[in-house]
């Protein structure tokens, strides 16, 4: 029961992640020039928007998974899926901030914060998924 309440406490995080990824994914997919202006003010005018738009669609998928995980009772598999998606962004953003030569001040400030936030969120979500799964297994053994 305690584990279920802990999973419920993650709902605001899941909702916030979903809204963030809808915003980021929507910006990248439908307004790539605005994304470039914010994060890559020194980019060449001919930067390949299609690559950014592809990534935007991936972020929109993240938002879908986060939204589904936020609805109803906490489910270990969905919490683990969101945790793994957040964890995937940690090395991706580290590489991004190191290799992107045209990042502006906003990019240099926000990307390291995203790395730290995504790591912490992933650890929280994966830990909650593990605890919920263990509690469910224990409950099923007790009822058998």
Image: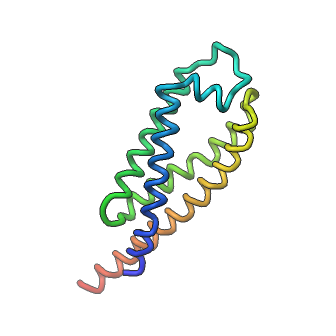
Q: Which residue sits at x=24%, y=84%?
A: 143
Quarter location, residue 9 = bottom left
The residue nearer to you, when weighing 71 against 142, is 71
User: How does the figure colour the protein chain or chains?
Assistant: rainbow
Image location (x, y in percent) of residue 133: 39, 71
Q: Which residue is at the far left?
A: 144
Image location (x, y in percent) of residue 71: 33, 58
Q: Which residue sits at x=73%, y=31%?
A: 103
Q: Which residue is at the far top?
A: 46
Number of marks in the rendered image: 0
In the image: residue 91, left or right of residue 4 = right
Image location (x, y in percent) of residue 86: 54, 51
In the image: residue 56, left or right of residue 33 = left
- In the displayed structure, 87 sits above or below 41; it is below
The residue nearer to you, when weighing 55 against 42, is 42
- In the displayed structure, 30 sits above or below 144; it is above
The residue nearer to you, when weighing 110 against 99, is 110
- In the displayed structure, 60 sits above or below 113; it is above
**Quarter of the figure that contains the C terminus:** bottom left
In the image: residue 1, left or right of residue 50 = left
**Quarter of the figure that contains the N terminus:** bottom left
- In the displayed structure, 60 sits above or below 1; it is above
Q: Which residue sits at x=74%, y=23%?
A: 42
The residue nearer to you, when weighing 114 against 126, is 114
Image location (x, y in percent) of residue 66: 42, 51
Quarter location, residue 57 = top left
């Amino acid at each position: 029961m305690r584990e279920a309440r802990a999973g419920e406490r993650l709902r605001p995080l899941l909702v916030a992640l979903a809204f963030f990824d809808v915003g980021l994914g929507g910006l990248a997919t439908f307004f790539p020039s605005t994304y470039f202006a914010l994060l890559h003010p020194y980019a060449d005018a001919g930067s390949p928007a299609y690559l950014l738009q592809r990534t935007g669609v991936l972020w929109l998928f993240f938002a879908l998974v986060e939204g589904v995980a936020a609805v109803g009772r906490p489910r270990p598999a969905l919490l683990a899926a969101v945790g793994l998606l957040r964890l995937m962004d940690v090395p991706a953003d580290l590489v991004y901030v190191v290799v992107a030569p045209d990042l502006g001040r906003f990019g240099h400030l926000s990307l390291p914060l995203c790395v730290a936030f995504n790591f912490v969120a992933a650890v929280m979500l994966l830990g909650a998924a593990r605890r919920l799964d263990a509690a469910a297994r224990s409950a099923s053994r007790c009822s058998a």
